[in-house]
Image (cartoon, rainbow, N blue to C red):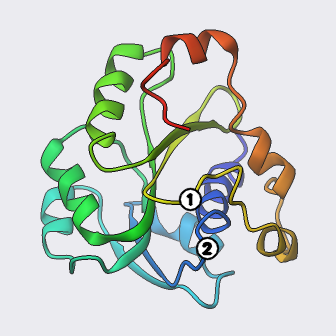
Amino acid sequence: MKIFIYPEMMVHVALCTHKLPTSVLLASDNRALLLGELSRYRESAVTSVGSANLLESFRNAEDKSVDVLLLDNTTDDSAVIAHINRVLKEDGLVVMQHPSLDEVEANTSLMQILGNYFKIIMPYHLENGTTLLLCSKEYHPTADIILQRSDLLEGHSYYNCDVHVASFAMPQYIRKNYLGIIRN
């Protein structure tokens, strides 16, 4: 996969879905790659923590203080996910890595835990079969995309509003495997 695809799709799908992303929490050990894309959003204050000990990082975060959480990792730890819910605002969303969609059992477990906190849980494709998972308390990534924001951003090598929407298209076997688990 080309190096620019991952940071563009992790950052811009989230920040062009949330209505007003003023506070972003970045949990990553690869911050530089994502901070470059986040710097395009002047109205967003970015706080960054490492992803090595997520429970400790989120435990210290203030309640209801984050609009968007970008998790450059995957977790099915119920305590970590509860803290993610605690720090996100009422309309917050999170984008995270997760196991391949072919790993139905692992993803089902993760999505069921996330289902306790999020109305919308949708995987989306990058290139070469890589997927990310968007979980939102309020905003739907294809119905609520902020077209003006996504169209006015310049300098992308991959992301645009059409790719944003198209990345959520799933083949029928994926839909069947996750029927009742994916929430859209």
Dot 2 lies on which element?
A: loop
Q: Quadrant of the C terminus?
A: top right
Answer left or right for 183 relative to 49: right
Q: Amino acid at mark 2?
A: Lys
Say the numbered circle drawn on residue 139: 1
Asked whether residue 53 appears in the rendered view, the answer is no
Q: Which residue is mark 2?
A: 19
Residue at 69% across, 81% down: 40
Would you say residue 98 is visible in this rendering?
yes
Q: For residue 65, what is the image quadrant?
A: bottom left
Q: Amino acid at mark 1?
A: Tyr
| Pointer 2 local density, CA inside 10 Å: few below 14, some 14–19, many at least 20 | some
Q: Check the image and report above or below for 114 versus 37.
A: above
- 83 is higher (above) or lower (below) than 63: above
Position of residue 123 measured from the top left corner of the image (x, y, whole percent) = 55, 36
With 125 as the anchor, is 66 left or right in this view? left
Name the foreground residue: 50 vs 122: 122
- Residue 90 image point, x, y percent: 37, 69
Q: Is the N terminus in the top left, top right, bottom left or bottom right quadrant? A: top right
